[in-house]
Image: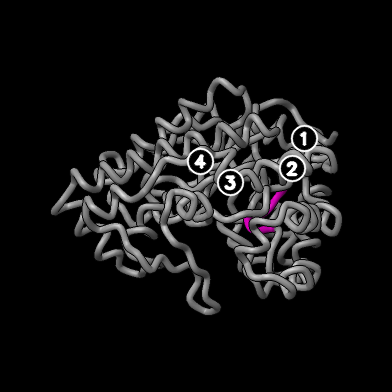
Amino acid sequence: MNDTFLKACRGEKTDYTPIWMMRQAGRYLPEYQKVRGNVTFLELCKSPDLCVEVTLQPIDILGMDAAILFSDILILMEAMGAPLEFHEGLGPIFPETIRDQAALDRLIIPDAEDSTGFVMETIRLLRKELKVPLIGFAGAPFTCATYLIEGGSSKVFWETKKMMFTNPQLFHNLMDKITEATIGYLQAQARAGAQALQLFDSWAGILAPGDFAEFALPYVQRILASLQQYDIPLIYFANNGATLLDLSITSGADVIGLDWRINIGDAIKKVGNRAVQGNIDPFSLLLPKDKLRQRIARLLDDAKDAKGHIFNLGHGIHQFTPPEQAKIAVDAVHELSCK
């Protein structure tokens, strides 16, 4: 197995910088679109054989150094009893929002094997196929809570912050329940064979540092502490989280994911004795080949003092990115980082 990714996570010496991309199995690949054309998104997420196929695509086509399980952060929320719908152009929708104690009481803490067994089966099947490490994942509690409270995506997060500031006990009760469900879900992924686990906190960046410390970080810390027993790398990614970096390094993660809004060299000085993951702007993949290679070379140089560095985008690859541009990036990282 090519274990370069795992070595970088642990801060061990590697022959080159490993690369994978968030959302690397997805809509930008024609091969994915072909699979997706025959099923709904939720049907795809719940079909282990199809999930294996699309998880393998970016490994086989682009030469990534790690695979990330194909799924969605909101699958667990559905397993908790929140009806979930996906609509083209609108994204995920929760028609029954969680805005009072009665609605919260209807949510359950599911048995991960019983309710999301298709995820664990996908992991087991992938471990038989993959020659690179497999990353499992979940949404961080704050991000998942925003979807349940808002009923979907939001630009201003009015209902979420209204609950935080006017009914903090209800908000913390919701976070407690999501946290317990997430612990069970990720522990099941580790037992099934995931070789690293990532918490995605897509909306953490909407919080002031003090509010992040009170309403989000303690739950991340609980989850990551519960996973230490599995002795696999743990990654925490707070999108738009440059102002939260001092707090994120207390999360218990082995690897701190970085978006593109901070110079990676400056971030490394704050992160200290941990590996980093990131952090090129996803849209920079649209640059001409020579300019893209120059940008990658500059980022690799800026990251030279990291305990360990996993090259990644600062967020998910955009659906309209030409796959050949992603391939240029993969090849450039491999070539330019060779020691």
Furthest residue toward left: 166
How far apart are the alpha carbons under marks 1 and 4?
Answer: 19 Å
| Between discs 1 and 3, the one toward the N terminus | 1
Residue situated in front as seen by the camera: 283 or 109: 109
From the viewer's perspective, is the residue at label 1 or at label 4 nearer?
A: 4
Residue at point 47%, 63% (across, down): 84
Pointer 1 local density, CA inside 10 Å: few below 14, some 14–19, many at least 20 = many
Answer with mark 3 or mark 2, whichever residue precedes in sequence. Answer: 2
Three-letter amino acid code at the position of disc 3: Thr
**Numbered range of the magenta stretch:** 18-24
Image position, residue 297 (x, y; %): 71, 52
Look at the image and name its color scheme. one colour
Q: On the image, numbered disc 1 is attached to which residue?
A: 4
Toward the top, the furthest residue is 229
Q: Secondary structure at mark 4?
A: strand
Residue 214 drawn at (x, y percent):
26, 40
Name the N-terminal-most of marks 2 and 4: 2
Labels 2 and 1: the sequence-earlier one: 1
Instruction: Tell me the distance, in whole angstroms, between the alpha carbons under discs 1 and 3.
Output: 30 Å
Q: Nearer the viewer, mark 1 or mark 3?
A: 3
- The amino acid beneath tag 4 is Tyr
Residue 318: % across, % down? 62, 68
Marker disc for residue 236: 4
Residue 310 x, y percent position in the rendering: 66, 42
